[in-house]
Amino acid sequence: MRSVKRRLRRHFGATAHRVAVRAHFAWYWLPLAAFFALLLGYGAAYMQFSGSQLRGMHQKIANVDARNQVVQFKLVQAERQLQVERAAQMNLSRELERVQTETMRLKEDIAFYQNIFNERKGLREIRLHTFKVNKALGNSDYDYHILIMQAGNHDKVTDGNLTLTLYGIPVGEVQPQPVAIQGSANLKQDLSFKYYQQVDGKFSLPVDVKPAYLLLEFVEKGTGRTNISEKVEIPAQ
């Protein structure tokens, strides 16, 4: 027991050795450490704040992209709808044009038959109802359509001669000149009809000749005079 007391006095008594407690770092390092700690805290807070802002910007960009996709989808739908409406309008215009053309043709047919059966006693007349020249599929090919009618009294058959003369403007010339048609100076055809006569045909224009017009002449036999003389312009090639 005495040995234990002796040991305690030796370590904790007045005669015990003094021990100096010193800090691990010198005092002048403490402000620098505090500054670095403050800097690290500020950096962490700034990174957190910047990260939240960056996430917010990414979210805004995503929202803008989503709205852009919706707008683009609506724009595509509107363009498709506009194309459909334009196609429907074009179809409607073509149908309206076809109906108008058909209506005009029917009106012409009605007028044609009215003129045929509008008989007046003692009066008989040869008329040209239709004379058209249309461009055909070939570059220098044309179609012609002729309809001659007998109006008034139909007591006898009409006999006559139909002559077609083609006129064109050769290279270096100014005035139209007769042009050979199907190897002849003109086309002649004998007609014999009652009420009406339809004549259709084709002709070709030389490549070095500009189109001018097609002249039609009809002379009824026994009259000695030209009953019909009409020309129609030839469409440009």
Image (cartoon, rainbow, N blue to C red):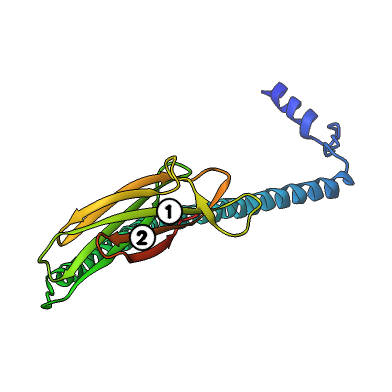
Q: As rendered, which of 48 and 37 lies closer to the eye?
A: 48
x, y (%) of residue 133?
38, 55
Q: Amino acid at mark 2?
A: Glu
Q: Secondary structure at mark 2?
A: strand
Q: Give the residue displayed 78% in from the left and 30% down from the top.
A: 11
Q: Is residue 94 visible?
A: yes
Picture disc at residue 227: none
Task: Identify the image quadrant of the N terminus.
Answer: top right
Q: Looking at the image, is 54 positioned above or below residue 97?
A: above
**Would you call the spot at circle 1 few (<14 residues within 10 Å), some (14-19), or many (20 or more)?**
many
x, y (%) of residue 199?
27, 52
Could you tell whether 82 is left or right of 119 in the image?
A: right
Q: Amino acid at mark 1?
A: Thr
State how many labels appear: 2
Could you tell whether 24 is left or right of 63 in the image?
A: right
Picture disc at residue 217: 2
x, y (%) of residue 64?
52, 56
**Would you call the spot at circle 2 few (<14 residues within 10 Å), some (14-19), or many (20 or more)?**
some
Could you tell whether 127 is left or right of 195 in the image?
A: right
Q: CA distance from mark 2 to mark 1?
A: 8 Å
Q: Give the residue displayed 86% in from the left and 35% down from the top.
A: 18
x, y (%) of residue 102?
24, 62
Asked whether disc 2 touches disc 1, contact meaning CB atoms under 8 Å apart, the reply is: yes
Q: As rendered, which of 156 and 166 lies closer to the eye?
A: 156
Q: Give the residue displayed 67% in from the left and 49% down from the top.
A: 47
Q: As rendered, which of 203 and 34 lies closer to the eye?
A: 203
Picture disc at residue 165: 1
